[in-house]
Amino acid sequence: ARWETRRYRLDRLRSVDLILEPFAYSSLMAHTMMSFDFGEDGRLILSIEARKETGETYNPIIGGLNQFELTYLFLDERDALGIRALRGHELYAFPVRANPLHLRAFLLSLCATTDNLTRKPQFYHIIRHNCTTAWIEHADQISNEPVGRRLESILNGLIVELLHKRGIIDTELSYDQAKRAFRVDHKVADAITDEDFSNLIRAGQPR
């Protein structure tokens, strides 16, 4: 592991992408992440995960039995996406429609929970606190149309389709067209060593 200290100016936060990583065994299940765009400060990914200790292996059944702590990981985008793409995983980066003030409030809420977890740990739970339901709870606090806990947040391979139906994904494309347009894993593998990584993997994406 390698940890870095970075600074991001909140007034430069301009957009966020919802990253979808479908599981190989079923497209109904996925890992989701948030990629925050701070303009010239670069991008920062948040991945909410089950914290596995040395020797532990994640299992969905065990993930519902309070066996793993909940962790919020802030990651370099090249690292977070690169390791997944090089393992052959599908990756999609869907742009999200978000009011700038709401987006800042959303990120600050996520940061506050991250900080609180150091003092009051929580368990990861595949239904109550998974990689998707956790950030949905934060988004719902500032939304006029909250998602809540529902089938699409548990079978979270479906969450982007739900948000697309609600107009939250920033595109005029149909959902099937958007999936093709915003798939990035092949671009990630090609651009992994390029300094302009984040822009290159999004090059040519329509709205």
Image (spheres, grey):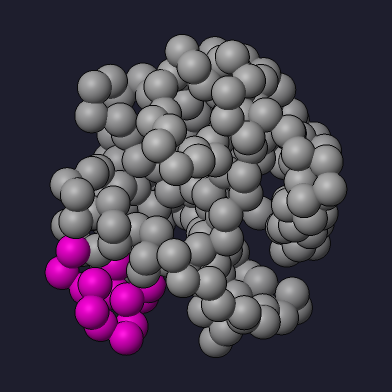
Q: Identify the residue at image location x=23%, y=29%.
A: 24
Name the residue at 63% across, 20% down: 66
Asked where in the image residue 202 lies, by quadrant, the reply is bottom left
Query: In which quadrant of the rendered image does the C terminus lie?
Result: bottom left
Question: Front-most of 165 and 7?
Answer: 7
Does 201 sit above or below residue 194?
above
Residue 183, x across and y down, in percent = 27, 50
Q: Quadrant of residue 132?
A: top right
Q: Is residue 207 above or below residue 144?
A: below
Up-down: is 12 above or below 158? Answer: below
Q: Position of residue 123 (x, y in %)?
A: 67, 29
Q: Is residue 199 magenta?
A: yes
* Residue 169 appears in the picture as rendered: no
Quadrant assignment for the N terminus: bottom left
Q: Is residue 189 left or right of residue 92?
A: left
Please say whether residue 4 is visible from this viewpoint: yes
Q: Report if residue 58 lies within the magenta region.
A: no
The answer to which of 59 and 37 lies nearer the viewer is 59
All told, the count of numbered labels is 0
The quarter holding residue 28 reads top left
The residue at the far front in this view is 55
Range of the magenta residues?
189-201
Asked whether 32 or 94 is in front, the reply is 32
Query: Residue at the spot x=15%, y=69% of the render?
Result: 190
